Amino acid sequence: MKKSKLLWLPIGVATGLGIMAINNTIMKKDVVLEVIEPAQSVYVSQIQTQSIAPAVKGYGNVVAKNKWQAISEVNGKVLYKNPKLQRGTFINAGVELIRIDPTSYQLNLNTAQANLDNINSEVEKLDIEKQRLTRSYQVESKTLALEEKEYQRNIKLNKKGTISASSLEQQERVVYNTQLQLNDLKAQVKQIPALRRSLEAQISQAQSQIDQAKLDLEHTIITMPFNGRIIDVSAELQQFVSTGNSLILAHDVSKLEVEAKMPTSQLSRLIHSLKQDREILDNLNAVPDIAIANLTAQITLRNSSSETHWQGKVTRILGEIDARLGTAGLVVEADFDFLEFVKRNDPNDSPIISGMFVEVTVNGQALPQLTVPLQALHNNRLYLVDDDNRLQLQEVEVLFIRDQVAAIKAEGLSAGQQIVLSDIIPVANGLKLAPTVWTEDK
């Protein structure tokens, strides 16, 4: 047994020495242990260049563009009131609404017409008198010439002693009297133009009275000026109305307006887009009227179950800014065919009516812009993916947002760069990424 233990001793020593030799060999060499960095899995897309128009949104109430208030222009009793003349009813253009007693105005017309007839009769008499005086003047002129000739002959005869001085004086008186008659006729003829001007002035006055009487008669009948809705009625049958009384208020339902309040910052972006079009810019410089830009707009009515849209156009920008809210008023006009709406009989359709609170979206001029999906914006920053699949943070200016797409601006950005759509927490420059291109089916 003792001999056996001694045999194992050399083997143990040899084994220990071998292990020590191997360990020393390993320790003399450099051993590199590779550390694997974890990568954040993210969905990515690309920056694109798109021709996109800024869209400005605002809100406001619908109002009728054309409002009509029937003001009584004559005095009298209401003899007729249309049975349909009630608040809320729809009445077509040309329909008689109210008739006021025309008796006194018809009498005024008859009196003015009779006065005009009398004056015209005086004019005819004056024309006849003028003809008579003119003829008499011509006759007396010839008579005077003959009498003067006879007077000259008598002077010669008197010098010869053929006729007496009394005969000469008698002929002289004949010439003098004839001259007086001729002067009187001449004066009467000269008065004719003045008398005629006076009568013509009376004719004008009488014609004005006739025109006024006819106008008053027309004003006794009040008709609907357009296809519209009756908003208010203040006249009753057999009621006496005075000049200046308000009788009816109606709204034209075919043309409506919305005064939409919009942020001034967005409105400035809209105006800026217009200035990129040279033709529009030239027109705006000549006439500063936004209507010439032909900007389109969409009016939207939202309720709990559906949306209704109407197309409109921008007609003007109001000149005042609400300093408290930082908004300006933009007026949008829309056409609405009420009769066509009734014919459609669509249960999901809705009429556009005064007083509705609606959303207005105005489209500017389309321009090439750098765009990214809206979900790529992280507090006005983009998460860029560099060539090493590492995260680079980039601050950007958001120009506007349209249909879940943001138009952006920043130095150094270009189309084709990869951008992160996913949220990253925590976020830091240089973070390792494992990008996956986002597709619509994901």
Image: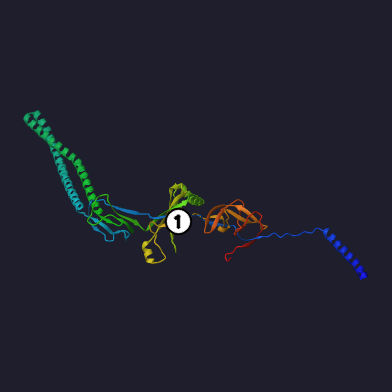
Residue 274's spot in the image, x, y percent? 49, 51
Depth order, front residue of 189/383: 383
| 301 sits to left or right of 17 | left
Few, some or many C-alpha atoms within 10 Å of disc 1 (few <14, some 14-19, many ≥20)? many
Q: Residue at x 43, y 55 (%)?
A: 313
Q: Is residue 356 above or below residue 133?
A: below
Q: Quadrant of the C terminus?
A: bottom right
| 221 sits to left or right of 328 | left
Depth order, front residue of 223/402: 402
Q: Is residue 293 above or below residue 306?
A: above
Residue 263's spot in the image, x, y percent? 48, 51
> Can the viewer see residue 358 in this picture?
yes
Helix, strand or loop for disc 1: strand
Residue under numbered circle 1: 360
Q: What type is the residue that disc 1 sits on? A: Val
Residue 190's spot in the image, x, y percent? 19, 39
> Can the viewer see residue 226 in this picture?
no
